[in-house]
Amino acid sequence: MPSVLFSFQRRNRRRVPTAMRVRIVARLFSRLVRFGRPLLVPLLLIFLVHQAYAFALRTPFFALREVNVSAKQPLSAEQLLRIAGIQRGQNLLALDLSVAAKRLRAYPHIARSRIRRELPNRLVFDVVVYQPAAVLQLDHPYFLDKEGRIFARVYDTRAARDLLRISGLDRKEVDRDPKAFRAFFRQALALRELYDQLRLTQFKRLFEVQVDPVLGYILHAGEGRIYLGHDQYRQRLQRVHQIYTYFAQQGVHSLRYLYANQQENPQRVAVQIAGAVPLPSTPKP
């Protein structure tokens, strides 16, 4: 078998002179500068802006010191700061106002809100709160606004002491379709306004409107009850006014029940006087 000889020959590598290396590096650097020169100024500006913004986030010059609040609403500046999750002294530029506005919108009593910065150290709250017009009595009392919207649960009964109370509805039914029941709430509020317009408050103060699916609306005024039915509310209440006036002239002020819910004749009102003793029935001959 013939022998195969392998020979390894070392290649001669020519050593590049140092001066040539320097020229190559200089040539590459000059090309880099020539092609990258248009980017140097924008990159430098970006760097400077970043450093300036980082400095602005650390400097106390932009610390929150003053808070302005829109007028005609009950929430104070400190309450709004607490709801929004903001503290005095925080850097105004570092605040995420979108998160703060979201927290404000989640607060039950706030209908609309807007926050804006006024540099260097002022924050302005433009807030609209719900105005309670009545209290809806379900499993718990809830505030209603003038449009019949439920917006908050009543925790402080003193805040609801002078408000109209609406009762007679089931919590499950209201939760099933709250928009549909807003019509009932608005009608109850309209009845309170009509009651005031007809000056019935001079006889009895209306403090509750009960909604009954069969009997319609029942007004709780003083110690009495006024059954209004489902329609012709003005005519019925005008007749009730005449009844109150007549009995007041007779010195009778304790009318227990006024049934003004007759469909055939809305002008007819049946009256039951409080404490009245029914007449004994006469036996037939």
Image (tube, helix red, strand yellow):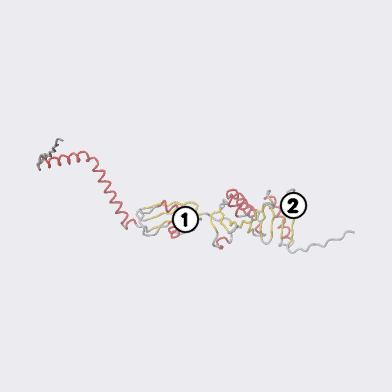
**Residue at 48%, 51% in the rendered image:** 112
Q: Which mark is residue 268?
A: 2
Could you tell me which quadrant the N terminus lies in?
Answer: top left
Q: Quadrant of residue 165?
A: bottom right
Q: Dots 2 and 1: beta carbons under 8 Å?
A: no
Q: Which residue is mark 1?
A: 71
Residue 100 x %, y %:
42, 54
The amino acid sitting under disc 1 is: Ala
How much space separates mark 2 and mark 1, taking CA atoms?
49 Å
Q: Quadrant of residue 37?
A: top left
**Residue at 64%, 52% in the rendered image:** 191
The amino acid sitting under disc 2 is: Arg
Camera-nearest residue between 269 and 166 = 166
Q: Residue furthest front?
A: 1
Residue 231 x %, y %:
68, 48
Looking at the rendered structure, the secondary structure element under dot 2 is loop
